[in-house]
Amino acid sequence: MADHNWLGGFPETRMRRNRRFAWVRDMLCETRFTASNLIWPIFVIEGNNRRESILSMPGVERLSIDLATQAAERAASLGISAIALFPVTPPEKKSDDGKHATDPDNLICKATRSISKALGSSIGIVCDVALDPYTSHGHDGILVDGYVVNDPTNVILCQQSINQAKAGATILAPSDMMDGRIGEIRKALDSVGHQDVIIMSYAAKYASSFYGPFRAAVGSASNLAGGDKKTYQMDPANSDEAMREVALDLSEGADIVMVKPGMPYLDIIRRIHDTFHVPIAAYQVSGEYAMLKFASEAGAIKERECVLESLLAFRRSGATSVLSYYALQAAEWLRA
């Protein structure tokens, strides 16, 4: 037997023992990610049997309502918990005050009714609550002298929320970052008999540089015209502020809180998890998707392995659900 005295003795604790066989690694796995943890964002366009590719998001398409309904059926069959709808509003229907958001026949409401009729309660329908898809200036609220005004915006957001709830939304996701809007939306929904509609608040939404492909996908980038949303979205440098935002939204009636973007903000997810012990959604945003997709197309990374690892990281940090443009493909990979 070889002389190992030069090692100074053997270690008493050998962590590798628990990694030797696949069965023991599986038995001791601390974090698991399944299709039920996924929410799939879908971009909806007008027309019938229409699909449009998105240059900055290869593999992601804008879909007409009939195709979006079929896509939702596929998602449900794979065990994905919910789909999140984002409308591509035609320019002629946009206005300074974004009032088309309250039209019961707008794209998101028609898509919601179609999917709800086809699938019933077999999949959740998340509707975005914000005015940026409907405003001619691309901001999430009403603009006065170059500044997004808070309280008048909340009035429209409440009307938009009721509109979407009546169409069949099961989750409303206010992404606007106006102060007090969660409480106002909750009261508005309850007052018209929609007490059971879930509010998934974008509680910690940062003024991030990772949103570019999304804004191009919904057609708001050109409306924003190089402007930013730093007067209402959070400073990426701030962590304690996120705790205050989350505490406020929970006190106002949020059922789920969201962190956006995702991967660069895993520390925020973990802080929320450890502090509040509530359901947390993370958004693997368009810029994150694009980086993974383009890197894989260049042969720099293995797409399947890196995507699933990134999704697992969200769960490990404390997220209970993840919005991801990879949701459908990830669900298929998990099933394979």
Image: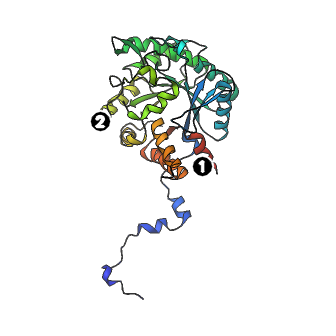
Inspect this view and state whether residue 321 appears: yes
Quadrant for residue 178, please give it. top left
Is 334 placed above or below 286 here?
Answer: below
Residue 234 vs residue 46, the one in the foreground: 46
Residue 300 vs residue 68, the one in the foreground: 300
Secondary element at image label 1:
helix
Q: Amino acid at mark 2?
A: Ala
Residue shown at 69%/23% (left/top)? Answer: 48
Secondary element at image label 2:
loop
Please report whichever mark, 2 or 1, sits nearer to the chain's N-terminal start: 2
Inspect this view and state whether residue 281 appears: no
Quadrant for residue 273, please give it. top left
Is 237 placed above or below 184 here?
Answer: below
Local crowd at mark 1 within 10 Å, few (<14), some, or many (≥20)?
A: some
Residue designated by label 2:
237
Q: Are marks 2 and 1 in contact (CB under 8 Å)?
A: no
Residue 173, position as x, y percentages in the image: 49, 26
Residue designated by label 1:
334
Residue 86 vs residue 54, the one in the foreground: 54
Residue 111, position as x, y percentages in the image: 62, 23
Local crowd at mark 2 within 10 Å, few (<14), some, or many (≥20)?
A: few
Is 143 placed above or below 322 here?
Answer: above
Residue shown at 59%/36% (left/top)? Answer: 81
Q: Disc number at residue 84?
A: none
Residue 72 vs residue 87, the one in the foreground: 87
Residue 131 falls left or right of residue 122: left
* Colouring: rainbow
Whole-angstrom CA distance, mark 2 to mark 1, is 35 Å
Residue shown at 44%/32% (left/top)? Answer: 212
